[in-house]
């Protein structure tokens, strides 16, 4: 039966009963080339006899339709359709423990290869990557704008209801509890430790220079805009401070 | 092996329709698979590879060729030598240390770094904890894929360069402090990145441009540390010195160790092993200090498993994280090893194993196993305050039952801490070090001469 409009799933992965491919050969090749041209690719893929030690030891394989052996095989045999298919969901199951890499007799790193595929999924703006990373945006905002991955104020009973009703067993305001940590760098609530302004601007320069902001724009344009605003402000603050220092030196 | 279960011919094994059950008895199945148990999870499984190289050889070559500068571990760092899995030497600096903090520890388990610094104070170890450090960004990278080898390498080089120059703020020479990495993922990630940097001229060229822009080259060259050192390695090398300061007998404590994947499975050739610690079959760190303190370290069948952290999963797919941590780690430690505590040496593992137990009650899995970092347990055994220093109130697991077994009156200590909080609210602040040292440049920095004058 013909449908006038394709469904959301069909837009992502194509029509399972149709002969026509989900994406064109050219795009499949482009995706594979992106994975393959990373300097890590040849180091992390050295051959595979399908022994399955990696899958036997994989924590994600206990709970998901995921097999590191399959990932290695798809890349080793250059199965472009299979690679594209695995990038829709399977690669996001990997727990990144690298047990597979430690055990592989060929010294492959299935976990490392998964990272190359995740990077490619982001570069190509795959909807699956956007969806899977949506709950991660708070972490990315924190990391990219401050230089810290997470902060005390992110961990609360609303955000982590399965961690129990009390984040701290001593009942006191977060600010006081943090001030009672005997490390001055940790008397913070909005960052895990106090990050110097120059430090976070340096990190931001790294993000700019290495294409990380482009990745972010592809995945979440709104988040990208917010981060740009925050960092513009930080740069201005730093410039103001530097000017003040120069004036003081002149005096 | 045979399961002996009647599953009406239904198979989920993925072996195809030609697969037939061997119908072995449990005893026969045990005999047939015994060889697996001889090698599985053992050191021999890790050391049977052909393509293993000591990446430090490439580092010395590059230094000889004038391409890089190596931040050396010298006598001032009071190094001690450990053996890694292949019997190679690894120098572990034990003094003049720059604390490369962990965002997860500082944000979530602050007693972890505080215990480490407290132990260093007890042993007159010199260190610097400062604000000019970023996260390694690897948690985010492994969780999201946002980032790349160039960004990871640039962050590594930036932070380690800062460690190298940090002492200048105190009027001391470059290289005075040596970086000590707190987080297992930072440790594993930095070691991976170091290997790629040493092998790829293309990567070196890319990051040199970035580091030049940041003003973070040494004589126009990249700075590479001689060793990348995890805090658990420092604890391991100092284990007997720590045990000398022990005030609490812990010989009645049954401890299970959860080693961190990114500490010993990532770049496994750099992990420390010791033939006298669990037969040399397990990474030595954490087990070493727990044995030195006199606890009973109990091996268990899922020792090799990860904790279930998953980087992305702990944030946005926690059903995997909590199922894996409870069923594969906590349950086994309690039921099989009869453990009093599970000890770890990494941020994500401690968080996962500690925080995810509470929800187990909903599924009748109320195991109540205390979870601490090795260094927190060591600090407790040496008399550190369970709340002011070890900050045990941030732990969701039942640390109180462990303290009771150690003979610590945690209720009295908790009251002390609650009273201390009132003083904090009134403006009191106790610090493990001079707070003015924490800012070494940029806004808030006061030069050394001003510092000396107070």
Image (spheres, coloured by chain):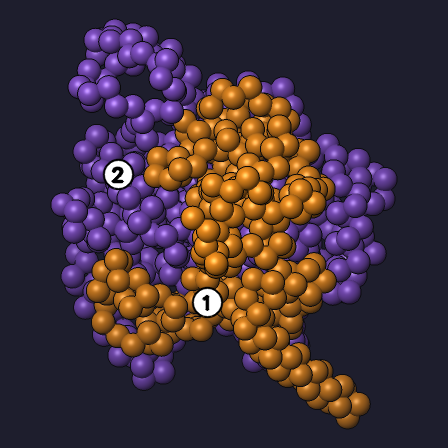
Chain colours: A orange, B purple
On the image, the x and y values in percent for residue B176 come to: 66, 55
Q: Looking at the image, which is closer to me, B96 or B115? A: B115
To which chain does the residue with label 2 belong?
B
Circle 1 residue: A138
**Which residue is at the front of the view, B104 or B111?**
B104
Q: Secondary structure at mark 1?
A: helix
For this orientation, the residue located farthest to the front is: A1
Whether the residues at callouts 1 and 2 have beta carbons within 8 Å, the answer is no
- Side (left or right) of A118 relative to B411: right
The residue located at (55%, 19%) in the rendering is: A49
Per the image, the residue denoted by label 2 is B327
Residue sitting nearer the eye, B129 or B141: B141
Q: Quadrant of residue A47?
A: top right
Q: Position of residue B432 (x, y in %)?
A: 43, 65
User: Is residue B348 visible from the viewing direction of this image?
Assistant: no
Q: Is residue B196 left or right of residue A183?
A: right
Q: Chain of mark 1?
A: A
Figure quadrant of the C terminus of chain B: bottom right
Marking on residue B341: none
Q: CA distance from mark 1 to mark 2?
A: 29 Å
Specify the farthest residue to the right.
B65
Q: Residue at x 24, y 19 (%)?
A: B9
């Amino acid at each position: 039966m013909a449908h006038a409009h394709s469904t959301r799933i069909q837009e992502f992965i194509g029509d399972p009963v149709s002969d026509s491919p989900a994406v064109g050969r050219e795009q499949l090749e482009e995706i594979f080339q992106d994975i393959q041209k990373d300097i890590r690719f040849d180091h992390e893929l050295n051959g595979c006899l399908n022994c399955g030690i990696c899958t036997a030891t994989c924590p994600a394989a206990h709970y998901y339709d995921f097999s590191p052996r399959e990932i290695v095989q798809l890349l080793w045999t250059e199965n472009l359709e299979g690679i594209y298919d695995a990038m829709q969901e399977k690669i996001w199951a990997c727990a990144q423990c690298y047990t597979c890499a430690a055990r592989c007799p060929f010294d492959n790193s299935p976990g490392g290869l998964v990272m190359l595929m995740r990077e490619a999924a982001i570069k190509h703006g795959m909807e699956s990557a956007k969806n899977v990373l949506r709950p991660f945006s708070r972490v990315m905002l924190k990391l990219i704008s401050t230089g810290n991955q997470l902060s005390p104020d992110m961990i609360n009973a609303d955000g982590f209801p399965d961690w129990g009703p009390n984040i701290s067993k001593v009942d006191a305001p977060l600010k006081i509890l943090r001030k009672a940590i005997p490390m001055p760098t940790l008397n913070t609530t909005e960052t895990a430790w106090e990050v110097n302004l120059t430090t976070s601007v340096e990190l931001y320069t790294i993000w700019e220079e290495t294409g990380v902001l482009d990745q972010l724009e592809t995945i979440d344009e709104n988040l990208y805009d917010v981060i740009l605003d925050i960092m513009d402000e930080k740069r201005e603050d730093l410039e103001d401070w530097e000017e003040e220092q120069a004036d003081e030196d002149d005096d | 092996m045979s399961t002996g279960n009647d599953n009406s011919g239904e198979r989920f094994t993925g072996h195809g329709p030609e697969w037939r059950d061997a119908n072995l008895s449990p005893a026969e199945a045990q005999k047939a698979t015994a060889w697996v148990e001889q090698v599985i999870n053992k050191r021999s499984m890790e050391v049977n590879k052909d393509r293993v190289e000591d990446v430090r050889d490439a580092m010395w070559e590059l230094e000889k060729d004038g391409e890089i500068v190596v931040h050396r571990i010298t006598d001032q760092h009071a190094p001690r030598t450990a053996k890694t899995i292949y019997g190679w030497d690894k120098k572990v600096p034990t003094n003049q240390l720059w604390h490369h903090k962990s965002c997860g520890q500082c944000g979530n388990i602050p007693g972890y770094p505080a215990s480490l610094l407290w132990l260093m104070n007890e042993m007159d170890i010199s260190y610097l904890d400062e604000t000019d450090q970023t996260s390694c960004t690897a948690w985010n990278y492994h969780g999201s894929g946002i980032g790349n080898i160039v960004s990871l390498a640039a962050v590594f080089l930036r932070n380690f360069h800062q460690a190298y120059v940090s002492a200048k703020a105190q009027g001391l020479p470059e290289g005075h402090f040596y970086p000590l990495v707190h987080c297992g993922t930072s440790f594993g990630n930095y070691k991976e990145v170091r290997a790629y940097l040493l092998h790829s001229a293309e990567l070196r060229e890319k990051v040199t441009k970035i580091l030049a822009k940041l003003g973070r080259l040494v004589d126009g060259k990249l700075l590479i540390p001689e060793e990348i050192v995890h805090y658990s390695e420092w604890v391991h090398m100092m284990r007997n010195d720590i045990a000398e300061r022990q005030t609490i007998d812990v010989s009645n404590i049954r401890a299970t160790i959860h080693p961190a994947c990114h500490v010993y499975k990532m770049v496994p050739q750099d992990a420390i092993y010791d033939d006298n610690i669990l037969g040399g079959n397990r990474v030595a760190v954490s087990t070493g200090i727990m044995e030195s303190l006199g606890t009973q370290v109990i091996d268990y069948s899922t020792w090799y498993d990860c904790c279930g952290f998953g980087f992305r999963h702990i944030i946005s797919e926690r059903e995997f994280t909590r199922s894996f941590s409870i069923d594969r780690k906590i349950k086994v430690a309690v039921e099989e090893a009869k453990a009093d505590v599970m000890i770890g040496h990494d941020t994500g593992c401690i968080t996962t194993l500690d925080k995810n137990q509470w929800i187990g009650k909903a599924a009748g899995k109320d195991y109540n196993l205390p979870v601490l970092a090795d260094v927190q347990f060591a600090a407790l055994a040496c008399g550190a305050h369970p709340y002011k220093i070890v900050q045990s109130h941030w732990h969701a697991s039942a640390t109180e039952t462990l303290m009771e077994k150690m003979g610590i009156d945690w209720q009295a200590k908790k009251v002390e801490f609650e009273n201390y909080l009132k003083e904090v609210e009134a403006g009191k602040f106790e610090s493990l070090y001079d707070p003015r040292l924490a800012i070494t440049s940029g806004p808030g920095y006061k030069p050394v001469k001003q510092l000396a004058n107070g």
